[in-house]
Image (cartoon, rainbow, N blue to C red):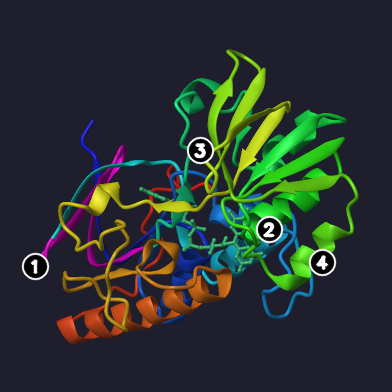
Amino acid sequence: MAKQQIELDLLIIGAGPAGLTAAIYATRSKLNAVILEEELVGGQIRGSYSIENYPGFESISGADLSDKIQAHAVSLGAQINDLGKIVSLSLSNEEKIIETDDVIYRPKAVIIATGATPRRLPVPEEANLHGKAIHYCELCDGPLYGNKDLVVVGGGNSALQAAIFLTKYARNITIIHQFDYFQGAKATQEQLHQNKNVNTIWNSEIRHVIGEKAIEKIIVENVKTKETSEIKADGIFAYIGYVPKTDLFKDNIKLNQWRYIETDENMETNIKGVFAAGDVRSKTFRQITTAVNDGTIAALAAEKYILEKGDVQHGESILNPNLSLV
Ligand SMILES: Cc1cc2nc3c(=O)[nH]c(=O)nc-3n(C[C@H](O)[C@H](O)[C@H](O)COP(=O)(O)OP(=O)(O)OC[C@H]3O[C@@H](n4cnc5c(N)ncnc54)[C@H](O)[C@@H]3O)c2cc1C
């Protein structure tokens, strides 16, 4: 069956805080816009049990904040297609074509807001133990470890917040960190230190995780002395940084050496009419507030670009109702 062809003003790829914010601004500007989402609407914050630095909310769960931003965007008419995966893409100054399983989109402008994904623990056994004993989402997998011993890897905010959350379930938590200090916020460190069953192995990295279905032992190396030691634990939760989701764009869009998308201050990439927003972009700080900032600027810049190009499609819903879940 021939795919549905859709001409539209703006296609936003990714429905995290950056993409949803871009959709709020675009729909308020009456742009005909669709957001594509390949997993869960809300992005990374869906996996955060408590957010305490988003203005207006002293403390809110990631799931609740995601729902609120999504509801806001949808109430303004944002159209989300969270069924189709992108199967091919061609982006140039003259033409933008994005093809999903069901639809061929021909937007005037594109905002890439595909975010980032957790960096995998660099041990040879990762692929085998992924999801069985090595995890990256404490909200999803923490409850599996009632009264067990856990290792948390990392020393930034994500690692510290995860360790605090996991104290609800685990008997003991050992944090393994490559430096001799935590980079996470002081307030989070203080919260962590209130827990008696958390200890830290400093200046160390995991080299091997021995075990087929479950962990038998973990080999840890002190990066300063090069001495190795063995520890026992039932599960590992790793928070050692993120990898941008840019594979789809690497042939068209200029990336930096770490594969983040380079933009100018208006969030425009090397291709006219293609913008990038949020964690996927080359920048120093990756937070919800910086993602919504980028989404705002990208949508306003995209609107300016479309207006300067010519007609805007002030259309009704352009999605086939069978494609849209939201
Ligand atoms: C556990 C955890 C806790 C955090 N806690 C905080 C906090 O307390 N405060 C704070 O400010 N920040 C926090 N962050 C960081 C914050 O979540 C990110 O900075 C923010 O989510 C970035 O938003 P984004 O929209 O750029 O990207 P993301 O949130 O990564 O969203 C990108 C979206 O794009 C989708 N996508 C990717 N590729 C495609 C594709 N090809 N097609 C369609 N869709 C695609 C993804 O599925 C995802 O939904 C936390 C992050 C994590 C992981």
Q: Amino acid at mark 2?
A: Gly
Look at the image and tell me whether residue 215 can be seen. no
Query: In this rendering, would 106 be left or right of 286?
Result: left
Disc 4 from disc 3: Cα separation? 26 Å
Give x and y (percent) for residue 172.
Answer: 83, 38
Question: Is label 4 within 8 A of ligand 1 (CB to nearest ligand atom)?
Answer: no
**Closer to the N terminus: mark 4 or mark 1?**
1
Residue that label 4 marks = 190
Disc 4 from disc 1: Cα separation? 53 Å
* Magenta range: 92-112
- Of residues 275 and 5, the one nearer the viewer is 275
Category of crowding for the residue at label 3, using alpha-carbon neighbours closer than 10 angstroms: few (below 14), some (14–19), many (at least 20): many
Look at the image and tell me whether residue 56 can be seen. yes
The kind of secondary structure element at disc 4 is helix
Which mark, by number, is residue 121? 3
Q: Is residue 173 above or below residue 69?
A: above
Question: Is label 2 within 8 A of ligand 1 (CB to nearest ligand atom)?
Answer: yes
Q: Residue furthest left?
A: 94
